[in-house]
Image (cartoon, rainbow, N blue to C red):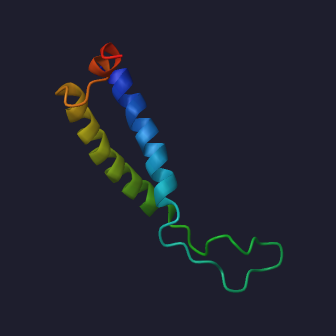
Amino acid sequence: MNWFTGVVVFLIIWWVVLFAVLPWGVRRVEEPEEGHDPGAPEKPLLARKFLATTAISAALWGIAYVMIESDIFSFREMVQGW
């Protein structure tokens, strides 16, 4: 895997993990002010969620990198078998 492919794979993993992490710890506002969305979270804690997303994505990217480089899971062999 070259560096560009590694960055693209990391970004794809990061976005997927972000959408999985966003609902963590969400609490709705009990009595929203006039004009505010009643479903909006009281404290979104986005910085904490971005850090968690980056840590989880780095671990998943590391696993993917090892699998790709060691040919544990090879797309080339799968395609040749068809």
Q: 70 or 54: which is nearer to us?
A: 70
Q: 3 or 47: which is nearer to us?
A: 3
Q: Where is residue 46 in the image (x, y as percent from the top left)?
A: 51, 61
Q: Position of residue 49 (x, y in %)?
A: 45, 60
Q: Where is residue 59 in the image (x, y as percent from the top left)?
A: 27, 47
Residue at 31% in and 40% down: 61
- Tell whether 59 sits left or right of 44: left
The residue most toward the top is 80
Q: In this view, does 23 lie above or below 6?
A: below
- Tell whether 18 sits left or right of 4: right
Q: Is residue 38 above or below residue 50?
A: below
- Residue 14 occupies which quadrant of the picture? top left
Residue at 61% in and 75% down: 42
Q: Is residue 77 above or below residue 33?
A: above
Q: 30 or 45: which is nearer to us?
A: 30
- Tell whether 43 sits left or right of 73: right
The residue most toward the left is 70
- Residue 71 occupies which quadrant of the picture? top left
